[in-house]
Structures are given as C-alpha cells and as structure tokens.
Amino acid sequence: MKFSQIIAALGDEVTGCSLDEGSLDEGSLDEGSLDEGSGATSAVGGELELTELAAIQSATKTALSYVEGPKFAEYIETTQAGALILPPDEAIQQKAQARSIPWISVKNPRLVFARAIALFYKPYRQPPGIHPTAVVDPSACIGENVAIGPNAVIQPNVRIGDQVCIHPNVVVYPGAIIGSNTELHACCVIHERSHIGENCIIHSGAVIGSEGFGFVPTAEGWEKMNQSGIVVIEDGVEIGCNTTVDRPAVGETRVGRNTKIDNLVHIAHGCTIGEAVAMAAQVGIAGGVTVGKRVILAGQVGIANQANIGDGAIASAKAGIHHDVPAGETVSGMPAIPHKVYLRAAILFRRLPEMAKAIKDLQKAMAENPPLKGSSKE
Amino acid sequence: MKFSQIIAALGDEVTGCSLDEGSLDEGSLDEGSLDEGSGATSAVGGELELTELAAIQSATKTALSYVEGPKFAEYIETTQAGALILPPDEAIQQKAQARSIPWISVKNPRLVFARAIALFYKPYRQPPGIHPTAVVDPSACIGENVAIGPNAVIQPNVRIGDQVCIHPNVVVYPGAIIGSNTELHACCVIHERSHIGENCIIHSGAVIGSEGFGFVPTAEGWEKMNQSGIVVIEDGVEIGCNTTVDRPAVGETRVGRNTKIDNLVHIAHGCTIGEAVAMAAQVGIAGGVTVGKRVILAGQVGIANQANIGDGAIASAKAGIHHDVPAGETVSGMPAIPHKVYLRAAILFRRLPEMAKAIKDLQKAMAENPPLKGSSKE
Amino acid sequence: MKFSQIIAALGDEVTGCSLDEGSLDEGSLDEGSLDEGSGATSAVGGELELTELAAIQSATKTALSYVEGPKFAEYIETTQAGALILPPDEAIQQKAQARSIPWISVKNPRLVFARAIALFYKPYRQPPGIHPTAVVDPSACIGENVAIGPNAVIQPNVRIGDQVCIHPNVVVYPGAIIGSNTELHACCVIHERSHIGENCIIHSGAVIGSEGFGFVPTAEGWEKMNQSGIVVIEDGVEIGCNTTVDRPAVGETRVGRNTKIDNLVHIAHGCTIGEAVAMAAQVGIAGGVTVGKRVILAGQVGIANQANIGDGAIASAKAGIHHDVPAGETVSGMPAIPHKVYLRAAILFRRLPEMAKAIKDLQKAMAENPPLKGSSKE
C-alpha cells in the first residue's frame, strides 16, 4: 500500500507531514492534494510502498512505524522504518527530517497507528453458517449471518443475534442471550441465562456466568448457596482469555458498556463494574464490589468484598484494596493507600535498617547523656 | 410461592415471626398452624405470594430477602422487599415491624436464605443419557442415570459413577475415576488416573491432574521429571472455573472432603489439602504444601514450597506465606506475619515519612545539644 | 524391576553403592559386574524387586526413593523404602548403611530419581491417527505419525509436524504451525499464525496467540488496536494449564528455547522471553517486557510494562517489578528491591510499632531535657 494511500485513509487525523517547506508552520495538510497523488504527496514519500506496520525498534524499510512522544524519539536516529507517524512536536519531527524519513504528524500517533493496522490486517472470523459438527438445540433462536464453528454446543433456548461469530468448541448453556456482532472465541463457556451484549468479544477459555463462590459456614462444614442470579455483560465489552465472571445467589453481576478486561481476571458474584473500565491481567475482584466508570485497575490488583471504587480511580499493579476508594484517587500498595503517600513510604521501606540504626544510636547517645529529669525510655 | 409455604418448608429453623402479639417472647412458632394456613399464618403475611429472592437493597414487593445482622439492618427502613428473614435480634425485628414487613427470625439468616433459594431455583443439569456426539471409549465403565453431554470425550478405562452429570466438551483422560453424583462443567479436563470423589462439582475450564511443574536444573538446562503420581479429590469438593490441580512426580496430590476452591486457583504437585478448607480466587499453592482442616485462604494468597498450614488457620487476602503457620493463627502481609502485628505495622508503614522526619529532627536536636560523652552517632 | 536393572540403566551416573567394603573409597562402581548380577550386585541388594518410586516419607518396602541432601536425611532413619538414591555424602550414606537399606550414590540424586521415574512410567499419548470426530480442514498440512484426538479442530492452512500429539477438543486457528514431536493437551487453543516449535508441551486449557490487550484511550472510551502480530514459541518449551500468551499489535511475542512456564501465567503482547527461563504459577508479565536467559520467576511475580530483566536474575514469590533488573540480581518485595535489602527491611517492618515507640520515647526524653539551643523538632 502506498504511503499516499495510507495518508488518504487516515486523512482527518493528519495535521502535518514531511513536505519540503512550510508544512510545519501551516500545521495542517491539504487532503485533496494527497488523494490526487500531487507533488506534495510525492514530496512526503507518497509513492513509497509500505507492506507492514512495525514497532520503531524492529521496523524494516517497507514498514510504517510511529513515535508517541519523547520517550521513544531517540529510536528515530537509528530506525530502518520506511515512514513514521509522529506527534505534533517539532523537535521529534526534525529528527525524522534529518534522516530523510517520510513522516506525517497527528495529535495521537498511537491511535492513528492503531487505525493504520486496520488498513493492513483483517482479524480472522469463522466463516458464516453452522458447521455440521456444531450441536445446536432446535429450541435455540439463531439470527442472520451467524457463524457457528465446529463442535460448538448451543443448548436449549439460547438466543443468538445477527452476525454473531462463534468459534470452535464454545459451549453456550441454556437460556443465554448473545447480542449481535459479538464474537465468542474457542473453548469459552457462557453459562445459563447470561446476557452478553452486542459487539462484545469473549476470548478463548473465558467462563461467563458460572456459579458464584457462595457457601455458608455451618457446624458440619460449608453449605452450598445456590446461585440463581445471572451475569449481564453490556455492549462493547471485551473479556480476556481464561477470565471468569461469576453469577450471584440472587440478582446479577454486571459489567458496564465498553469495559475492557484482560486475561485471567476474576470477577466474583454480585459485582457491578461500570462503563469504560480497564482491568489488566490477573486482577481479582471479590463479591459485591462496585467499580465506577473509567476506573483503571493495573495487573494483579485485588479488591476485597463489598468495596466501592469511585469513578476514574486508578489502582497500581498489585494494589490490595480493602476499603472504598474515592472517585479520581490513585492508590497503590497492600493495603492500598494514596499513591503519593505510598511512593514516599516505599522508598523509606528499604531504608528501614538505616532508620533502626539511627534510633539505636540516638538511644545510646541519650543513655550516655541522660536527661536531667527521668524519661520514659525503657 | 406463598410465604406460609416457604415458612413451612424452612420450619425447623424458624424461631420467631411477625405475629401480632407475644411471638417474640415465645421465641418459637407453632409449625402446625402454619401448615394449615391458620390465622397466625395470615397474621405473618402468610398469604403473600413471593416470586423470587433478592438482596435487600434491590428487592421488589414480591421478593423475599434477608438481613444477617446490624450491618445491613438500616436497609430495612427503605427496602421494597415483600418479606424478610431476620436474625434473633429484637431491635432489627422492630424495624421490620415498624414498616409492617412480614418477617421470620432464624438463628442463621444467611443459611436459611440459602435454603430458601433452593425452593425457587433448580440448577440446570444436562439431561440423562449419552449424547450421540459424545465420544465414549468402549472400555469406559459408565454408571446408571449418567448424563454425558455433546462432544464430551471419555477416554479408555475411565470409570463413571451413578448420576454423574458431564456437560459438553469435557475431556476425561484414560483411567480416571469419577464418583457418583459428581458434576463436570463444560470444557473442564480430568487427567489420567485422577480420582474424583462423590458429590463433587468441577467447574468449567478447571484442569485436574495435569503434570506438576517438575524440572531438574542441569548444565544443559531444565530436565523434565515425569509426573507419575495422581490427584485425589475427595467427596463433596467443589473446584472453581479454570482452577488447576497438578499431579506429582510420585505419590499424590490430595484435596480433602468438603473443601471448596474458587476460580483460577493453582494447587501444585504433591500438596495435601485438608477437609472443609475454603480457598478464594487466585490463591496459589506451591509444591508439597500441607494445608490443615478448615483453613481459610482469602483471595490471591500465595504459599511457598513445603510449608505447613495448621488446622483452622486463616490467611488474609494477598498474604505471602513462606513458613509454617500454627493451627488457629491468622496471618497477613508479605511475608505473612501474625495479623495483629501486621495491622499495627501496616498503619505505621504509611507514616514512615513522619517517622523518618522525627528521627532527623532528633538527630539535629542531639547534634545541637551533644552528649557530654561521645556518642556513636554517625 | 530389579534394583540391579535400575542401576544398570542409570549406570553412568552411579558413583558409589552399598557394597560391603571399600566402595565409598573407590568412589565409582564397576558397571560390568552389575550387569552380570555378580556378588557385588547382590551385596547392594541387586535382586531386590522394586515396583514403584516414592517420596522418602511415604515410601513402602518395594519403592525406590531418594534423598537430595542433609535436609531430608533424617527420614532415612524411619523410611520404609526398599532402596535409596543418595548424594556423595558419607554421613548420609552411613545412615542408610546403619539401617541396611540398599543404596547407590550419585552426584545429583534428584536428577537420577527423575530418570528412574522414566523406567517405570510412560506418559499417556493419544494413539496415532486422526480420530473420525476430529475436524481437520483439507488445506491443513499434517505430518507423519500424527495423533489428532476426538473433537479436535484444525482450521485452514495449519501445518502440523511429524509425531505431533493433539489431545481431544484442542482448537488450532488458521495458519498456525506446530513443530514435530509437540504435544497439545486437551482444550488448549492455538490462535491464528502462531508458531509452536518442536518438542514443546502445551498443557490443557492454555491459550497461545490470542489478541493482546491493546486499546487506545479516546474521549469516547477505549478504541481497539488490532493485534496483527504473532506468537513464536521456540523448541522445547512447556506451557502450563490455562496459561495465556498474547500476540502483539505488530511484531511478535517470543518465548525462548527450553523455557518452562507453569500454570495460570500471563505473558502479554510483545514480550521477549529468553532461553531456559523458569516461571512458576500465576506469574504476570505486562506488555513489551524483555526477560533474559535462565531467569527464574517464582510464583505470583508481576513485571510492569517494558521492564528488562537481565540474564540469570531471580525474582522471589510475589515480587512486583517496576524497573529493570540487572543480570544475576535477586529481587524481592513490592516494589521489588535487592533481596538482601528486602530481607533486612522485611524483618524491621514487623518491628515498626517498636520503632515508633522508641521515637516517641526519644522525643519525650528530649522534650524533658531540651537542647541548650532551639531544635527543629515540631
């Protein structure tokens, strides 16, 4: 694909490019001229044939790459990339200019790089139709243009929307609802009565709507509490490989619109997860937790029963949250505390031996120079 | 279902109810009168038709709900619940009385609520019979009234007890034994020669009896140690979704009777887990660990190789256990220490900057007022 | 199997045995005499029939067991083992001699024990051939002596090498390559275009090559970044049950030769894992991390985005690594710090209450005996 074609496809986003003159000052590009393959396009390397996208460290001559900001800008000096997507930062652009690497500048290089990938790459989808080895109960209601792969099992009274893509060996338990355009990857399991919204992706091996871990302690041991509730996954949610989302004894576990959940996460029975939340891998959320909108939970974070996490809060990797977190707060550590406090305390943690010695020295000095009146020192 | 019918079904547990007079003093209920739909029943709202169970915060007019103790008692003032299960606490009962909400009181409201769920809800079971798409080796020995779902695979010499329920796409490797009344959920894998007891539930995606992580370091790298042992899961055990229990090089990994294990837990080769243990999600237990009876491990706890955890011990969420824990001890933190010590230390952790400043101030004050004799201060 | 036969099979490794006289001084054994069942063999218990291998604590009369070093040597005094593999440590050998337990000594008892297991135990392999219920796309290229179990699904353009063993219900997405002699256990999923090397073992439920967790924050929420890259698993790698290895947006995620990965591990998009690395269960590695050769990561370790872990580094259980770790360094704690520093600091953590009290006492003493000139104390 020619660089000029890529630029045309991304047109609205492009605010500058490697023109011979003045383009940096003008701050925006005449899209029309690019579409027509004009002199300007040729000046930015528009005829350059690009065959792939690549990270800047490993890019080859025919690869389009990107730099998001100053952190990776040094790689421009050595990259083999054929062309670059740069931020609106003149110093960074000069580096590309100095090496005569064609570039465009955009407000959000990573976002534009993401969109450029879609020009080169189409994710694999199971071909439409029900594979003869799939087992689809006659009572299931199947939409239009649905793909159901080999050995998938669709149990009674399931409802599947249009354009749903079900990969091989998926199991959907009775009464589950799968919204339109949703994709279920191989070997994932959707349990009874779960509602999966539209435009969701459930990755391989994920289990949605299984029984919550509900037991009541008795003198004879643990007595099982039946889990009669359901899981509701709203539209646009992505759930990672081997992640588990449990249903509650009564009521529902809910994951809000556009929330993105990574691999091996556990969400227990009765949680309410807000919209546009991001959870990195191996996060664990105990029963009855409420997570607000746009919350970010880094890897291996744990949240204890019934805690409320306010909108926009952030938890650093491995944070152990035992209490409510106010909206907008960033917390770290175990037990989790405000991030700024944590940073100062964590630095001092490794200096505890010094502190202990200083205390000992002070005690010794004090003992050698006792106060005039008696102290409470042991 | 009428409230009177529910009360009758739970009869033995009910110690009080919303009678017009005197019932709180009497402390127990005449069951017979309830069965007959007598005036007493009517007085407690016995004719009330209840259609579901719900948490008290979200209960509607036709829902039965419960309050376990003072923590959730305030919700009685605003709940829409049609009827309540309450503890033997007169102050809490008065709140329900004040709002004219019919109630019963029982010693353990959560337990009775759990049993009430079973009146409304029957978990889905695969219908009995071997589905034509299941692959069952002719050498497998299958009990009576067994259900084997679509695309399940039962390998040679497997033995399956009566009333076992095997959901779709389960794989049972050769020589495994599955006890009566046990349920294997979709896509779980039971490896060769594993013994699964009676009345167990293995949840979706769990893997039982896979090879332990056994490698011997050599000059050439890691040399694999064959894992010739087995996993034994005793009766009444529940194992969560995507949890893994490995078999050892020799001998066995054992999980004791009535132990309940949540999702995404890892139990390594050669562990011995006692009876009635509870493990929350994402717990990880390294090789050769012994866990006593009735131990409780909260979420994301880790236990290092060969540690012994005494009967009745408790580990708080995220605890990192490197050494033996005495019976009955509660431990927290990483490395895990007695919970009371941890609580005090964790509070001081965030105050480390204050402590460091106090030490500095003392050093400064001491320097300005030096002891008469020399100190060891740096 | 006779003890003499076992010794013969392990011959090269054996450096001493329970001969009547002199063998400990000679330090090596005449193998020929063992093969011939000579007097020497009989003297070491060569006629003894051994039926299994066992840990020393639980070994019975017909079991061969081993002791690696002083730690387990005390068990020699009570073991029922029929014969022992011992280290070249005369004190330990005397213990066996004292109880008349036949033994051999070798440099690395655990390694020799591992090899002895292989004399008694052959791991189960799916029988060769393509099971009629497997769904193999006609465009797939299948090598010789391949076993493909029931209900496995091999999608278009997959290439499978010779002697590959694919267990039931495995799914291989289009274009994946599986190297010779590799084994794929039940319900594992190999995603599109992944390269799996030769002699690998992918355990049950593992997911290789799924989409990385790549989203770009925008004003409207999270925008998906297509994941067009691939996962490359080099030769001799073992990947544990329900472990996930994600592919990146561009480029590759790579796991080096002979690396061994335990259960429930997460390796994010774009990581480069070196050769002969060992990762224990539930390790989580964020995007773009580089892990050097022979690194050891203990259970539940987490590594943050883009960190570089040098060759031979070790991370203790639950370490939380936010920055680069130099080659050969051992780190512990969260945030991870050098292990020696951590050990001292962790001991003092639990003594924080004492330290706080000592500071308070010093402050009080100082207040009662104020410096001649004013201090900065608050």
Image (cartoon, coloured by chain):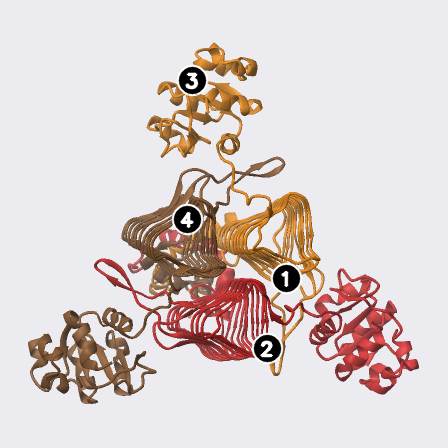
Chain colours: A red, B brown, C orange
Q: How far, Cα to Cα, is label 3 from label 4?
A: 40 Å
Left or right position of C280 against A91:
left
Whether labels 4 and 1 share one chain: no
What number of labels is visible?
A: 4
- Image coordinates of residue C357 in percent, x first then y, are 34, 60
Give the residue drawn at x 78%, y 77%: A105
In this view, the residue in front, B325 or A258, is A258
Mark 4 = which residue?
A: B322
Q: How far, Cα to Cα, is label 2 from label 4?
A: 48 Å
Q: Amino acid at mark 3?
A: Gly
Whether labels 3 and 2 share one chain: no
Specify the subunit that label 3 lies on. Answer: C
Secondary element under disc 2, as helix, strand or loop, is: loop
As drawn, which residue projects farthest toward the right?
A39
Give the residue drawn at x 9%, y 79%: B33
In this view, the residue in front, A348 or B204, is B204
Specify the subunit that label 2 lies on. Answer: A
Specify the subunit that label 1 lies on. Answer: C
In this view, the residue in front, A135 or C301, is A135
Q: How far, Cα to Cα, is label 3 from label 2?
A: 70 Å
- Image coordinates of residue A26 in percent, x first then y, are 83, 86
Mark 2 = which residue?
A: A181
Mark 1 = which residue?
A: C269
